Amino acid sequence: MSVNWIRRSDRLKALPPYVFARLDELKTRATEEGLDLIDLGMGNPDGCAPQPVINAAITSLAKPQTHGYPPFEGTASFRQSITAWYQKCYSVDLDPSCEVLPLIGSKEGLVHLALAYVNPGDVVLVPSPAYPAHFRGPLIAGGELYPLILSVEQDWLIDLTKISETIAQRAKLIYFNYPNNPTTATAPREFFEEIVSWANHYEVILVHDLCYAELAFDGYQPTSLLEIPEAKKIGVEFHTLSKTYNMAGWRVGFVVGNADIIKGLRTLKTNLDYGIFSAIQAAAQTALQLPDIYIKQVQERYQKRRDFLINGLRKLGWGMTPSKATMYLWVPCPLGINSTDFALDVLQKTGIVFTPGNAFGEGGEGYVRISLIADCDRLEEALLRLQQAGICYQ
């Protein structure tokens, strides 16, 4: 029963429907209709977290002190493990007392950072397509979004030369993400050097999302923003344990970088939450300390799926270049059909779930994102269904 005087806030009304919530509705309906779903929509890793991670959580649960409120800034041991991980991976030195902040997943931190720094009317630069949290956070904060339309012709890289002087002078933050979700694009070190120089010149806060740092293939090593001299003066970098360590439901990530920017986010969060459950922090600390062989096995698993699915899609007419990183494929829709209609057509005819590209912003129209979250036997079944349904690239 609805009451007409109960009205949502303007900030909530401004948000477009969240695509993954809409996909959940469609998946539920399809399941009710008897379809055997092959869900390649969300970036939701299959399988359990590594056993040492689970064991660390169990051990921590047995300690009485684990069950109290954790420190707002995270446990000292987890913060120190983050700094050790950054030093090992990127030769970046961080102060665990002020340049590191654990988060309840990176999505939470990305959105709350906007609330901490964006005033109504502030210009926020956001690539399109982009991970939804990159533009939904500024929208909730009342910011004025300025989309930076990415294109295949530019290898899905931000073209800073296309940002007008007027917009650059007004901009307060710029969100970006390489390796990129959803396009799978990677950026050379020169790009990071360029954006640091640009942001220093225009006094714009850099917000880099490095959530696919370890999911890289064929010898490619992603660049950390903080490897670039001067970056820490104006920027922060977000990371999550959801993808690499199969800890999506655990809700744990962190942000590192400029101490003043992190302090503002911490101040906001002290008014919103009590931090991450200590047992989860103990588990996350263990994950960051796993031997390199674990990361190699994860990379090999996703690379195998990538190669298998690309080879199958090629037989259906899609000419694709293997992505160097992430857990996705970014696939063009057949000619004459938009991304939402194509994803719905595939779901209804085959029971396979793709994410329409326009869910990631206007720049994603004409593509669907396919998550590599199923083993090759299930991917083979998906390819067979596509073939039988006559779905191909024309």
Image (cartoon, grey):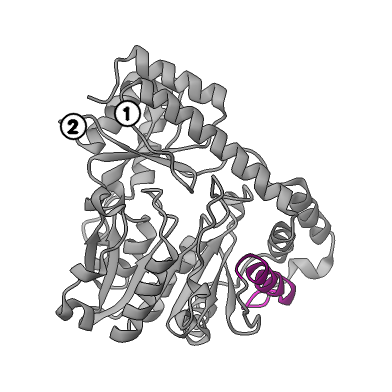
Q: Residue at horizontal 58%, vertical 57%?
A: 251
Residue 121 visible in the shown view: no
Label 1 SS: loop
Query: How far is disc 1 from disc 2 in space, using C-alphas?
Result: 15 Å
Q: Residue at horizontal 67%, vertical 77%?
A: 71
Please name the predominant secondary structure of the magenta segment in the image: helix
Q: Residue at horizontal 60%, vertical 73%?
A: 274
Q: Position of residue 142 (x, y in %)?
A: 26, 73
Q: Which mark is residue 318?
A: 1
Residue receiving disc 2:
337
Amino acid type of the residue that numbered disc 2 sits on in the rendered structure: Ile
Q: Horizontal placement of 262 versus 67: left or right?
A: left
**Count of numbered circles in the view:** 2
User: Is 31 in the magenta?
Assistant: no
Q: Is residue 129 above or below residue 253?
A: above
In depth, the one of 138 and 209 nearer the eye is 209
Q: Position of residue 329 (x, y in %)?
A: 41, 39
Q: Position of residue 14 (x, y in %)?
A: 23, 62
Q: Which residues are magenta?
A: 71-90
Q: Residue at horizontal 23%, vertical 29%?
A: 334
Q: Which mark is residue 363?
A: none
Amino acid type of the residue that numbered disc 1 sits on in the rendered structure: Trp
Q: Earlier in the sequence, mark 1 or mark 2?
A: 1
Q: Position of residue 20 (x, y in %)?
A: 38, 45
Q: Quadrant of the C terminus?
A: top left
In depth, the one of 148 and 60 nearer the eye is 148
Q: Is residue 191 above or below residue 92?
A: above
Q: Quadrant of residue 234?
A: bottom left
Q: Quadrant of residue 105?
A: bottom right
Q: Is residue 174 above or below residue 301?
A: below
